[in-house]
Image (cartoon, rainbow, N blue to C red):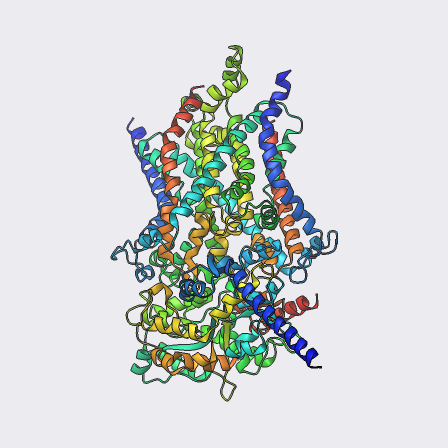
Amino acid sequence: MNTVKRKKVIYSVFELIGVLLVVTFLFFPILWILLTAFKSGEDVYSISVIFEPTLDNFRRIFSSAYNFENYYMNSLIVVFFTLIITLPVSILAAYSISRFKIPGKTLLMFAILATQFIPLIVNVIPFFSAFRNWGLLDTTIALIIVNLGHTIPYAIWLIKGFMDSIPKDMEEAGAIDGASRLRIIWNIVLPMAKPGIITATVFCFVVVWNEFMFALILTSQEAVTLPVALSYFVGENGVIWNEMAAAGIIYVIPTIIFMLIVRKQFVKGMSAGAIK
Amino acid sequence: MKKSILAIMLIGFIAVLAACNNGSDGGADLEDQTVTVAVTEGNIGQFNAWEARSEQFTEETGIEVEFIGIPYDNLLDRITAEGISGDASFDVVTHLDVMGPSISQFLEPLNNYADDDFFDRFPESIVELSTYDDKIYSLPLRANAQVLFYREDVFEDLGLEPPTTWEELEEVGETITAETDKSAITPYYQAGNNGQNLAIWATYLWGNGAEILDENNNPVFNTSEGVEATEKYIGLLTEGLAPEGAVSFAEQESRTHFKQGRSAMWIGWWWVYSDFNASDSSAEEVQGNVGFTTVPTWEGGEQVASVSTFPLAMMESSKNKEAAWEFMEWLSNPESEKSIVMDSLNEEVPADQFSTDIVQLENLRDEELNELGDGLFNIGGDSFENARTFPTIPQWPQISDILSRAISNMATGEDVQSELDAAAAEVEQLLQE
Amino acid sequence: MENRFFKYILLAPALLIMGAITIFPLARSLWISLHEWNLTESLEIGSFIGFDNYVRAFSDANFWNSAWVTLIFTVATVVATIVCAILVALLLSKEKPYISYLRAVLIIPFALSPALVGYSWRFMLNPDYGVFSAIIGFFIPPLADVVWLGNAVTAMIALISVAVWIWLPFMSLMFISGIMGLPKEVYEAAKMDGANGFQTFFRITLPMIQPIVLIATILMTMFALKQFDPIVTLTSGGPGNSTEVLNFLVYNTSFRYFDMGYGAALGYILAIITVAFVLVYMRKLVKGDDWN
């Protein structure tokens, strides 16, 4: 009995060390970037953790010279509409591929992914010319359209993977009850596939939120998004790291809030999956 | 007879009148136009000053001016996309000199708007950087001359004089590294970043009588003079005069190294002078202690310096060319250049409009300006006069990258002769295609 | 009858949107890759030259260099990320409150702008004022004077570390979802049989999350092959061209040297390399039951 207990203690000590290592590796750089955001131009080049913190970097971001609210709004609009379109269509498509016999399914899955094999840069010019002709340059609509081209394929892949692991029995039970297919998807499949859907949502959220190349080429004033605005801190004088860090911190907040909100959903979805 | 003369005079008069009318009509047309100017982001004082002063231009001419900012590192991507579309969303654009030759097909030659005299106001060398195929494509309103910065306090303490030759630079360098904990000089060897690491190399090379390309555009930088020059340049690192980190430094990082008081000399663009002495990012020991002089040369060799420009060009697809030129011409007025810098040096404008950028000959030698600017403009003027420039052939960006990579390789320890030979072979192959 | 078309109706919106958005640019760049088009010579696409641009790559030393760099970077990044992510997932797939919060903030490195990440690591690796250089020098004094970005090997290590740092959070999250979704009964049964931790992991956990591991590996391979922003901002391909990945070469060829035809061809070659990787994994994936 004693040895079992000791084993348990040793095990949890190792576990704790492991968690600490992971936390250090992942969060030390974040901590340093966070500290940098409060540093003055001078302190940036010192590795001392004792310095006089300043809010100047944040003041500069919120100053009128830097149109921060506008960039933020654009990014939020692009992310919101991209996700609101991506998720339903990808969930339905993933469900269909996961549950039904479709001729050439493997090829279809491959083709969906194949749309993403080419480096983005190669497609920039064709997109630019097309949007120029349609008068959509410098609009958020253009960015939403382009982003949909990236999010949907990945979302289908991610969600299908998770749907495959959900047992079919419960749906069949629902079908016997005479519920329509869409109802079954809504009431039974969605709750159980939640962890996968959330993982895919997080992925799409971040990809769209960070998309740089197209935002750079397709926008100039009105529809500029945060990643492009962040690069305004690079110039002839090099990288103004403290200001960029400050902007970067503010810029990552929506993702963290989003993650904190879905944190519980994650577990709920998981336990629902585990009931079975 | 008389009648016909009268008739001719009348016709002439009418023609003049019509011309006048046309002129003022043209003016009225321009009045409703908006010129869009694309500059780079990154808080460049000169561009901010232009934007602030463009209101005055609008008052004078009725032409609206709108500024848009493009990320510094991605300027070329944007110009390319806009250029290919054949319908650019801006009329006037700034770009790095190195990009010029390859984007000239998107740009409007300015010879149609100004005669050659107009460009005489600039030093020849920087106009050359805007000239491709005998046509001038841009106004070099922002240009940098290469100078040697040094720490006056350190030199004084050790009883040293600023070096005028590379040998002297090594001598004072050895004293500095022996007597202080500083590096003697901080060069920048890192590849990429638009070939920044070529500037000092080229100064060594040209000063030693070597060339990058000969008249027929054949690579000749691997001659014995070229190799000697390159070995000396890399020698800064191998002899321990430069910090080891210089291998991985881009220009901005090496500047930071100097600004932090970690080295006693720095070679680079003159505009950073104000940054060294005043900026809050310079260490306290550095502020107010930075002097400058012309770049060293070889014993008995010709005095040369590199220059770089960030010129202003007009897009070929612009629909407001007349108005755009009006604005460009207005910006090129020596008076307005002088007043921007005077206001900066007298601290009469907000800090974000601070600019010491002078490129016009009469301003470079202007007494008032030089007095306020510690004689910086005179030194800059000398450098512009001694300046050599990189080739302006369309393949230059690619050649620049090949050389930039070779320099980086040699700094990490590759053999100089064989790296230069390999680079020469690659350049030759490229130019033959 | 309705049922026969139902599956296609579900599929249609996604396929239509994807097709409308992606097919034109893909076809257009394929078309460009089959042409001679040097932008410095002409604004118009040049003459048709078949596969000459593709053939040209084989005699281009820069291409081979980039291909190798890409391969090393991709294999190292994918292996390191996936292995670490599984370990992290094992640690963090417990239902403890502090771990639940940890899972929520875990995503931050992935969510940060890739450009900021690259620049920040560059600062942190600076030999003078870089915090990493200082820490490494403190714990391992012989390494104190290493200029991390000044040498081909260490620059590559730095690059791989950054890529792992970016992708580890997301990949861990995928595996956490996978592991936490596994039925508990199986584990209880294993416990009864007296299986130890290792046995449970290799005999139960790993096989059961294998489909997710494979999907994660496929996606991770694609992301590594296409990694761009952090590389440009961290090393810009240097020193020399020791970290110039293929995607960076594509960018330089098209947007700096204006060789649009060759650039597009290099892009398609990168796509072909991706196909090769993906096909290998997908065969494994399809073999597993259920997938079809």
Residue A36 pos. (x, y %): 33, 54
**Farthest bottom residue in view:** B300
Residue at left offset 45%, top offset 27%: A194
- Is residue B192 at least partly visible in the picture? no
Residue C251 pos. (x, y %): 58, 55
- Image position of A101 (left or right of B382): right
Residue closest to the eye, C8 or B139: B139
Residue at left offset 51%, top offset 82%: B386
Quadrant location of residue B184?
A: bottom left
Residue at left offset 48%, top offset 51%: C160
Which image quadrant: the C terminus of chain B?
A: bottom right
- Image position of B137 (left or right of B373): right
Residue closest to the eye, C189 or B40: B40
Residue closest to the eye, B257 or A71: A71
Which image quadrant: the N terminus of chain B?
A: bottom right
Quadrant location of residue C285?
A: top right
Residue A168 pos. (x, y %): 53, 19
